[in-house]
Image (cartoon, rainbow, N blue to C red):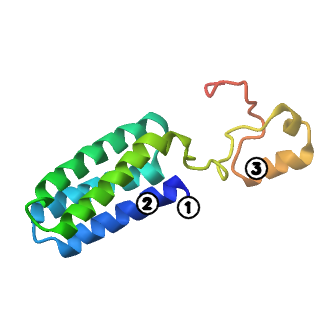
Amino acid sequence: MSSRTLALVLTLAGAAALFFRTPEEAAAAIGLLGAVLALAAIWLTAGRVRRVLAVLATLAWLGAVALAVSASVIAVIAAMSGLAAAVITMVRGQDWPGWSSRYARPDQISEDEADNPRMMWESLDRGMDPTRRRDASPDD
């Protein structure tokens, strides 16, 4: 199991256990905040933003642990699970891939494509301006 999958599983398990099994509402609320931050860090971001969200998630999960101590053993275990996920995200998150740009399209066609009539028509189909070069400014 990859560290990213482990962080995701720990986050979801901790948040679910806090939400459904904890009588302490404050611990559950802070745990859910930590889960949202951790999920955003795991799936939606990369680089420094991922690191910042992981630190914020870690702080939220630490707050949930502190509040859960007075609630029950399950709440403490759930909060520790989320805390572990946030720490894994903070430590290993920079190695995880970010959102893919696989389906992103360039704004202009390249020089080689501009000389090919077929590529010119395909660029029109994609909604691009085939007469606009990559090195041209948008004001030209």
In space, the residues marked 2 and 1 are separated at their CA atoms by 11 Å
Q: Nearer the viewer, residue 132 or 38?
A: 38
Could you tell me residue 45's position as x and y percent?
A: 46, 45
Amino acid type indicated by mark 1: Met
Q: Residue at x 57, y 47 (%)?
A: 97
Could you tell me residue 130's position as x and y percent?
A: 77, 40
Q: Secondary structure at mark 1?
A: loop
Image quadrant for the C terminus?
top right
- Residue 131 versus residue 18 in the image, above or below: above
Residue position for label 2:
8
User: In the rendered structure, which disc, 2 or 1, sits on the residue that comes first in sequence?
Assistant: 1
In space, the residues marked 3 and 2 are separated at their CA atoms by 42 Å
User: In the rendered structure, which disc, 3 or 2, sits on the residue that comes first in sequence?
Assistant: 2
User: In the rendered structure, which disc, 3 or 1, sits on the residue that comes first in sequence?
Assistant: 1
Residue 48 appears left or right of 128: left
Amino acid type indicated by mark 3: Leu
Q: How many marks?
A: 3
Q: Residues within 10 Å of mark 1 (few under 14, many from 20)?
A: few
Residue position for label 3:
124
Q: Residue at x 18, y 67 (%)?
A: 73
Residue position for label 1:
1
Q: Secondary structure at mark 2?
A: helix
Could you tell me residue 11's position as x and y percent?
A: 36, 60
Could you tell me residue 129's position as x and y percent?
A: 72, 41
- Residue 88 versus residue 115 in the image, above or below: below
Q: Secondary structure at mark 3?
A: helix
In space, the residues marked 3 and 1 are separated at their CA atoms by 44 Å
- Residue 18 versus residue 98 in the image, above or below: below
Q: Residues within 10 Å of mark 3 (few under 14, many from 20)?
A: few
Q: Residue at x 73, y 24 (%)?
A: 135
